[in-house]
Image (cartoon, rainbow, N blue to C red):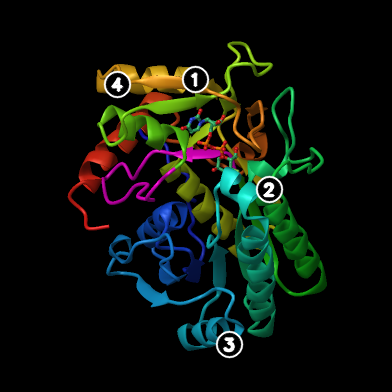
């Protein structure tokens, strides 16, 4: 029998504003919210998201989350009761090259969104944070570990976390901060997947290489202090992560109080192990080149996921091979989309 994270006595439905809902993680969460019966209004500037990825059952407003007047108007006219904030810049090495762009998108605009949230008295705020707020760790990272972000991206997310916590303490706003580990995979029903152009994420890059969309891929560094020398990450299926958001929303609605939670499985794979699984599943021995370490990368990032599990989260797709299979199916589907 398939276990789900849906509560037995579902809380009242929410009218959700999902910023960045035309993107990868926001988009999967839109599907999960709709599946759970919530109403969804997406606010997205389509800078990296896609119009086609927003289902007809959600409303799409094209605009900037940093536009205070627009956000207030959207909240008022749609009767928004919960905000899920995904809109962000998300690529660690990019943030090293363009720190100010990252601070604007991820910190400054979150401040504006929070101001609108308080001004319009929205009670629930859910935030996409990241394992990038942690520094290097020898073991499983728990939420109690001190923040020590190593990149402008991580610092921009941590700044946003601080603003959210302080705002929650000062105003009638409950919040859930979800710290994502490495998100991968695609909707098991094939409705969406990672569609970003020029993607830098390992699993997507490996699959694109297997499909001949890239002539070769690089592995960044083999001299990390890990068992095989390759960097280790905790890969989480995007559909399980989307479920975690629905669960977080139901907790906030039930009045359980604000919380910050890791979203990972608590199991790490090295870059080489991931590449080997992609090769085995696709049956294609694509070309891989060893390259120097990438700026901003950590040796090992693996979650302690006890807290999320204690909330009743039951992952459904926690096999790396399932993540790779779904991502591979989506990559083939993507060829038929105009994007
Ligand atoms: N990698 C390669 N070759 C590639 C791409 C990636 O060797 O072509 C390596 C990276 O060096 C790293 C690992 O694969 O060691 C994972 O890299 P990703 O780019 O897939 O992901 P990151 O760990 O850099 O970052 C991701 C998200 C962040 C999030 C972080 C949390 O992009 O938003 O996971 O761990 F903060």
The tag earlier along the polypeptide, 1 or 3, is 3
The N terminus sits in image quarter: top left
Residues in magenta, as a range: 180-199
The tag earlier along the polypeptide, 4 or 1, is 4
Circle 1 residues within 10 Å: few <14, some 14–19, many ≥20? few
Q: How far from the left and from the top, in percent, is residue 212? A: 25, 31
Query: Which SS class for mark 2?
Result: helix
Residue matched to label 2: 154
Circle 4 residues within 10 Å: few <14, some 14–19, many ≥20? some
Whether tag 2 and tag 4 are in contact, CB under 8 A, the answer is no
Residue matched to label 4: 281
How far apart are the two marked residues, 4 and 3, measured between alpha carbons?
49 Å
Is residue 319 visible in the rendered image? The answer is no
For marks 2 and 4, give the one nearer the viewer: 2
Question: What mark, if any, has residue 290 been given in the picture?
Answer: 1
Q: Please state which of residues 31 and 88 is positioned toward the viewer in this rendering.
A: 88
Residue 187 in which image quadrant: top left
Residue matched to label 3: 69
For residue 265, above or below residue 24: above
């Amino acid at each position: 029998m398939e276990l789900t994270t849906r509560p037995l006595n579902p809380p009242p439905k929410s009218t959700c504003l999902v910023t960045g809902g035309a993107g990868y993680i926001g988009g999967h969460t839109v599907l999960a919210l709709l599946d759970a019966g919530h109403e969804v209004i997406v606010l997205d500037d389509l800078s990296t998201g896609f119009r086609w990825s927003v289902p007809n059952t959600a409303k799409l407003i094209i605009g900037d989350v940093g536009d205070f007047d627009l956000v207030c108007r959207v909240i008022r006219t749609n009767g928004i009761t919960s905000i899920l904030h995904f809109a962000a810049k998300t690529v660690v090495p990019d943030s090293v090259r363009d720190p100010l762009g990252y601070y604007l998108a991820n910190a400054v605009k979150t401040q504006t969104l929070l101001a609108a949230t308080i001004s319009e008295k929205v009670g629930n705020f859910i935030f996409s944070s990241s394992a990038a707020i942690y520094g290097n760790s020898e073991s499983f990272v728990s939420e109690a570990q001190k923040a020590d972000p190593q990149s402008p991206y991580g610092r921009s997310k941590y700044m946003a976390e601080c603003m959210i916590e302080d705002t929650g303490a000062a105003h009638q706003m409950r919040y859930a901060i979800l710290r994502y580990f490495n998100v991968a995979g695609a909707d098991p029903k094939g409705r969406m997947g990672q569609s970003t152009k020029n993607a830098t994420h390992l699993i997507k890059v490996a699959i694109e290489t297997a499909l001949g969309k890239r002539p070769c891929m690089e592995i960044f560094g083999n001299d990390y202090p890990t068992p095989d020398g390759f960097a280790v990450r905790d890969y989480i299926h995007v559909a399980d992560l989307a479920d975690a958001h629905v669960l977080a929303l139901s907790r906030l609605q039930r009045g359980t109080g604000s919380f910050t939670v890791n979203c990972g499985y608590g199991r790490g794979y090295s870059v080489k192990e991931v590449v080997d699984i992609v090769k085995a599943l696709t049956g294609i021995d694509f070309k891989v080149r060893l390259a120097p370490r990438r700026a901003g990368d950590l040796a090992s990032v693996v979650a302690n996921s006890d807290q999320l599990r204690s909330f009743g989260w039951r992952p459904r797709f926690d096999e790396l091979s399932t993540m790779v299979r779904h991502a591979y199916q989506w990559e083939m589907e993507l060829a038929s989309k105009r994007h």
